[in-house]
Image (cartoon, rainbow, N blue to C red):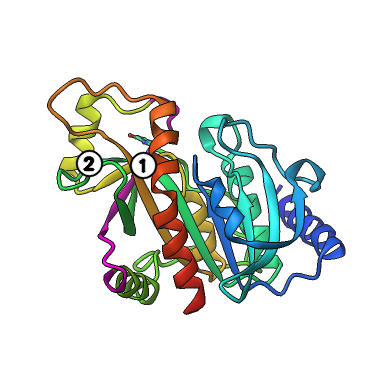
């Protein structure tokens, strides 16, 4: 079965190379409601997921589903607008498939974004949290199964899943622009339900600052393959609060859209410095 994954990833990469000679060393994966950021990219080639062999097709509202090659901040980048979530019914292998393809295309640094619920009481809707670590108890590890030795080791170290050097650069960028950037731990859940009040409390007690339904499986595979990962959460709702905490997907998308310019600024400036 893993031979099959290797074959498919290589076939997909070969197809993409036949469509566009990408020089990009940086890739960006955009989360729910954060897809407008791609407008910042001077796009040279756009490929809908539906045209890409072996690519799963995104089903969530707010995810348009295309791969873009172009320039951002004077650097060649490749962006995935629309990601695949475990809660949509994709297997962990499918969720991480694009990340493996990106590595085959020559990408070395992966920038990830997501919408997340705030758990740290100092957070407000619209804030940005740089992820400096994660806790993954519920979503299956995408490396379960026979190890693909040509891509990475059986037991990858995860002491620095999000590169400290990239976090430090991002913090400098934030300080220069007077932009408040939190740093914290991302707790991943499978979704698609938002958390119960008791679950939000538990997530807070175990030491997480934000909770969401993506990013971690991609981060694990990127680490396995030796890529550098930088990830941010846009806080779109607050899980820990006194009054009713009814959360809707619409509210999440709206808050993500509102915070998008900050994320765009941070990513653009960071890419300049890579
Ligand atoms: N929980 C989980 N995932 C999320 C949330 C949340 O509160 N907000 C946005 N994505």
Query: Which residue is the site of mark 2?
Result: 119
Question: Viewed as shown, does residue 273 lie left or right of 100?
Answer: left
Quarter of the rendered structure image containing ligand 1:
top left
Depth check: 213 or 40 in front?
A: 40
Label 2 environment density (alpha carbons within 10 Å; few <14, some 14–19, many ≥20): many
Label 1 environment density (alpha carbons within 10 Å; few <14, some 14–19, many ≥20): many
Mark 1 residue CB less than 8 A from any atom of ligand 1: yes
| Residue 152 visible at all | yes
Question: Viewed as shown, does residue 162 lie left or right of 224?
Answer: left
The picture places residue 148, in percent across and down from the top left corner, at: 63, 61
The picture places residue 234, in percent across and down from the top left corner, at: 37, 48
Query: Which residue is the site of mark 1?
Result: 116
Q: Magenta stretch containing residue 96, yes or no?
A: no
Q: Residue at x 54, y 58 (%)?
A: 221
Q: Residue at x 87, y 63 (%)?
A: 18
| Residue 143 visible at all | no
- When the figure is inspected, residue 172 is found, relative to residue 58, above or below; the finding is below
Q: Quadrant of residue 200?
A: top left
Q: Residue at x 62, y 52 (%)?
A: 80
Q: Secondary structure at mark 2?
A: loop
Over which residues does the magenta segment extend? 175-193
Q: Secondary structure at mark 1?
A: strand
State the separation of the CA atoms marked 2 and 1: 9 Å
Q: Magenta stretch containing residue 177, yes or no?
A: yes
Question: Viewed as shown, does residue 200 lie left or right of 50?
Answer: left
The picture places residue 202, in percent across and down from the top left corner, at: 19, 35
The picture places residue 157, in percent across and down from the top left corner, at: 41, 67
């Amino acid at each position: 079965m893993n031979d099959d994954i290797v074959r498919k990833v290589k076939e997909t990469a070969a197809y993409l190379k036949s469509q566009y000679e990408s020089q990009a060393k940086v890739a960006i994966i955009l989360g729910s409601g954060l897809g407008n950021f791609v407008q910042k990219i001077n796009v040279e080639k756009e490929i809908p997921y539906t045209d890409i062999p072996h690519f799963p097709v995104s089903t969530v509202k707010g995810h348009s589903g295309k791969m873009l090659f172009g320039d951002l901040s004077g650097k060649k980048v490749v962006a995935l607008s629309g990601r695949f979530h475990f809660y949509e019914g994709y297997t962990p292998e499918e969720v991480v498939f694009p990340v493996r393809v990106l590595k085959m295309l020559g990408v070395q640094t992966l920038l990830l974004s997501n919408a997340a619920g705030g758990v740290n009481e100092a957070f407000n809707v619209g804030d940005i949290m740089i992820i400096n670590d994660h806790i993954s108890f519920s979503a299956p590890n995408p490396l379960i199964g026979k190890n693909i030795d040509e891509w990475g080791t059986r037991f990858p170290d995860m002491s620095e899943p999000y590169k400290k050097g990239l976090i430090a650069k991002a913090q400098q960028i934030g300080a220069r622009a007077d932009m408040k950037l939190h740093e914290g731990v991302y707790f991943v859940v499978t979704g698609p339900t938002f958390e119960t009040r008791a679950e939000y409390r538990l997530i807070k007690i175990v030491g997480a600052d934000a909770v969401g339904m993506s990013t971690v499986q991609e981060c694990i595979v990127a680490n396995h393959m030796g890529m550098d990962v930088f990830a941010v959460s846009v806080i779109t709702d607050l899980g820990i609060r006194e009054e009713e905490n009814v959360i809707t997907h619409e509210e999440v998308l709206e808050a993500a859209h509102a915070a998008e310019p900050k994320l765009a600024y941070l990513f653009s400036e960071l890419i300049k410095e890579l």
